[in-house]
Image (spheres, rainbow, N blue to C red):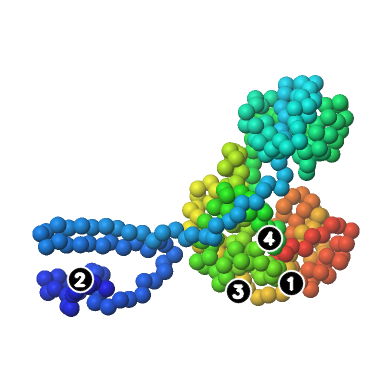
Amino acid sequence: RTLHVDEPTNQVDWNTGSVTLLTQNQAWPDTHHPRRAAISSFGISGTNAHIIIEQPPTTHETRTQQELPHIPWVLTARSQAALRAQAARLANHVSEGDSVLDIGYSLATTRARQEERAVVVADDAARRVQALLTFARGGAHPDVVTGRAREGELVMVFSGQGSQRLGMGRELYDTYPAYAKAFDAACDELDHHLPHPLRDVMFGDDEDLLNQTQYTQPALFAFQTALYRLWESWGITPDTVTGHSIGEITAAHITGTLTLTDAATLITERARLMQTLPEGGAMVAINATETEVLPHLTGYEDKVGIAAINSTNSLVLSGEDKALREIADGLSQHRTTWLRVSH
């Protein structure tokens, strides 16, 4: 309320426009945008001080960053012989007590990147040295992956509903600040539209709750957006992005077509509307052609339909659970995967 004012001045037409003088405190509604206020101070000498203040961003509990579970040592050279020689030199150089992280960082960031590559990942220093020596002598070791780098475009695909699981991204959240920052930002926007905080649902223990469409779709969006931002923080960005089903919204956000606020609004409203549909539905992916499946849908036309044709020999059926299971039994010679969906 405005202090020290009993009634509005009669020098202003208060009936025009939407400006009012607050003589009593009133609730400030949440519009899902930062609250902003303009404050004026009129001095007795004519000085006018004006300031605009904005609601601060939401803060989260300080996280204790976890150690990286696996640290790769990357070797690069112009030929296989030079690559194996480099492995031998590194094995002879490493001593007990050396920082695995420091060596990995130096190998990845301070050396020229040549065509021939080898990556060593092992749980302890002794095993790493053994892997390096085996590779240097021309042998194969399970902790060494080799390959040849080549130019080409990078495409990232964002997946659809059914790929969710409890705790997805939790290790990334606890380990990489770039992932945690992007995930928190996504949850802040999505939580405006959800009955329960999304972070609690994803990192909780109620699998049925996560598999409800109203949470599944926002969860996949938050996870995939944060995962992309993590790759981006490492300097890995795609030439092209695409999305399957709900992943299309993530792709649209990543390309800048949708802001985070707009994407969160769209995806939660989409999920809410789907959640209100009648229950008892299911979806199943079948490794079969459309021609092979269509005869099995005879008599079920009002209960089951083809939801997506993903490739020439892979499609998804959607419909009433009981009818779908009868159809799937008739296609037992084909591999089937039931999607984790609530509708």
Count neighbours of disc 1 (C-alpha within 10 A) and say few if under 14, some if 14 to 19, many if 20 or more: some
Eye-nearest disc, 3 or 1: 3
Q: Residues within 10 Å of mark 2 (few under 14, many from 20)?
A: few
Which kind of residue does numbered mark 2 sit on? Thr
Above or below: residue 222 compared with residue 124? below
Labels 3 & 4 near each other (Cβ < 8 A): no
**Residue 150 location in percent, x, y?**
70, 29
In the rendered structure, which disc, 2 or 3, sits on the residue that comes first in sequence? 2
Image mark for residue 142 = none
Q: Residue at x 60, y 63 (%)?
A: 199
Q: CA distance from mark 1 to mark 2?
A: 57 Å
Q: Earlier in the sequence, mark 1 or mark 2?
A: 2
The answer to whether one can see residue 225 in this image is no
Q: Secondary structure at mark 3?
A: loop
Q: Where does label 1 land, which residue?
A: 320
Q: Nearer the viewer, mark 4 or mark 2?
A: 4
Mark 4, mark 1: which one is toward the viewer?
4
